[in-house]
Amino acid sequence: MTGFTTPAADTRSGAAAGEARPEDLALPSGLARLRRLLAVLAVLAVVAATHALGASAQSVDDLRGDMPTGDDLRAEQAEVAELRAEALAERASAEGDLFEVMFRRDELDDTQRRLAAEIEATTTNLRRLAVEAFITGGEVGTLEYLAAVQNASDFSWRQYLVRSHAGSSRVAVDRLRSLREQADSEVLESIALAEALRIEITVLETELALLDDRDDAVDEIMPLAEAWDRAAIAIAEGAWGIAPNDKWEQLRFCESTHNYEAISPSGKYRGAYQFDYPTWQTVGGTGDPAAAPPEEQDARARELYARRGPQPWPECGGFLE
């Protein structure tokens, strides 16, 4: 593995590429000078044509594929922040309403407060039994309470629940009906409103959890998007453009045998393109190059090539030419 070298420390690239400094060349005179000039111009034309062909074979959009831009992700973050603020405000409002409902319930007489608490406890227990029966493939007759408690509107479903009666839950269902008959309308209204508010709070908490997941996903992909943003700018501004994919495959094989977690024996050069830490940082990388996702390593290598050509790879860079 040859590894990357930084601009300041790269003393091998000139020799590897066979470059000579202009002051070391003795300029020929007369016809010899003209022939040399024409030869140089011809070489430059071939090089320019080669780079143009490489650039035309691929675009930055082709390279980054479905990877969004940093601006797209920042817009996503702004949207998530707005939705989170709305959900937090709605949850706070629902929690306030629930507190008020429970506060008013405390003003009821002891009998009605006891009925309210027992009705809610029995309803919760029956709901749990219904879920367990459904999950285990057992009788679903415990769902009959839905017909009485939640006024199911589908007549055929209500009839099915009644027919699918579960003996083990019949006593509990009858007890719930009895309790509801003893409660006055204010208690029943309080129970229904409290249940609706609890459901709303649960839905909002689920929404907040999903927004957190979206935020985490954006945070995870942001370094990749910004790496490709940098690569796109470098390709537009740099002198070397884009080398075809097959040439990059040859370079990766030469540098690391396509191993994105490769580390040179000395530990200095890391990743598929054998970045050293200073060079990795010059193209926006942070942390260990060998620990970066392949997409990020690809993007940062493209940026480096667009700005400096094959020079950072003194032994393997020839594959990019």
Image (tube, helix red, strand yellow):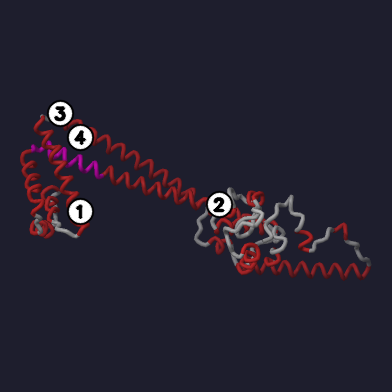
Circle 1 packing at 10 Å, graded few (<14), some (14-19), many (20+), is: some
Q: Which mark is residue 107?
A: 3
In the foreground, 33 or 211? 211
Q: Quadrant of the N terminus?
A: bottom right
**First along the sequence among labels 2 and 1:** 1
**First along the sequence among labels 3 and 2:** 3
Q: Which mark is residue 101?
A: 4
Q: Secondary structure at mark 4?
A: helix
Q: Is residue 125 above or below residue 303?
A: above
**Which residues fall within the magenta stretch?**
183-199
Circle 4 packing at 10 Å, graded few (<14), some (14-19), many (20+), is: some
Q: Which mark is residue 248?
A: none
Q: Position of residue 147 (x, y in %)?
A: 12, 52
**First along the sequence among labels 1 and 3:** 3
User: What kind of residue is marked 4?
Assistant: Val
| Label 1 to label 3: alpha-carbon separation | 36 Å
**First along the sequence among labels 4 and 2:** 4
User: What kind of residue is marked 2?
Assistant: Glu
Q: Which residue is denoted by mark 2 in the rendering?
A: 226
Q: Marks 4 and 1: which is nearer the front?
A: 1
User: What kind of residue is marked 1?
Assistant: Glu
Indicate yes or no whether the magenta region holds residue 193: yes
List the single residue furthest toward the right.
30
Q: Secondary structure at mark 3?
A: loop
Q: Which residue is denoted by mark 1 in the rendering?
A: 132
| Label 4 to label 1: alpha-carbon separation | 30 Å
Q: Are marks 4 and 1 in contact (CB under 8 Å)?
A: no
| Label 4 to label 2: alpha-carbon separation | 50 Å
Left or right: residue 48 compared with residue 179: right
Left or right: residue 135 compared with residue 8: left
